[in-house]
């Protein structure tokens, strides 16, 4: 009986590991995109923020 429970539980644990890895990968991509946008905004603030400059703010 213990072996049956272990055989049923093992794939579930592996599925959780796959989801955790996918979550980390997605978070890394999102963080990378946000960082890229912030760097571009820091380098070229007038190009990215044209509307703010027109309003006089």
Image (cartoon, helix red, strand yellow):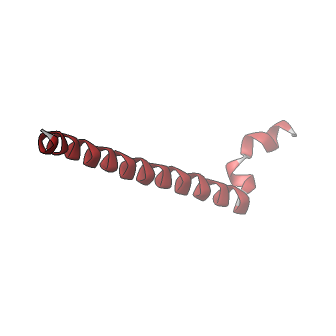
Q: Where is residue 3 in the image (x, y as percent from the top left)?
A: 13, 45
Hey, which quadrant is residue 25 in on the image? bottom left
The furthest residue to the right = 56
Whole-percent x, y for residue 31 in the image: 55, 53
Q: Measuring from the top left, give residue 29's x and y in whole percent.
A: 47, 54
Q: Measured along the vertical axis of the image, is residue 6 above or below residue 47?
A: above
Residue drawn at x 26%, y 49% as measured from the top left: 14
Left/right of residue 43 with respect to residue 34 in the rendered view: right
10 and 52: which one is in front?
10
Q: Residue at x 87, y 40 (%)?
A: 57
Left-right relation of 37 to 49: left
Q: Which of 47 and 32 lies nearest the eye of the viewer?
A: 32
Q: Nearer the viewer, residue 44 or 19?
A: 19
**Which residue appears farthest toward the front when viewing the image?**
1
When asked about the image quadrant of residue 43, the answer is bottom right
- The reply, left or right, for residue 4 in relation to residue 36 is left
Q: Which residue is drawn at 49% across and 50% down?
A: 27
Tell how many labels. 0
Q: In this view, does 36 lie above or below 53?
A: below
Locate the N terminus and report the quarter of the image it occupies.
top left
Viewer-proximal residue, 2 or 17?
2
């Amino acid at each position: 009986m213990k072996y049956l429970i272990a055989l049923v539980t093992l794939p579930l644990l592996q599925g959780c590991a796959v989801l955790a890895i996918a979550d980390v990968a997605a978070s890394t991509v999102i963080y990378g995109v946000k960082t890229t946008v912030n760097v571009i905004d820091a380098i070229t603030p007038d190009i990215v923020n044209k509307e703010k400059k027109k309003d006089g703010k």
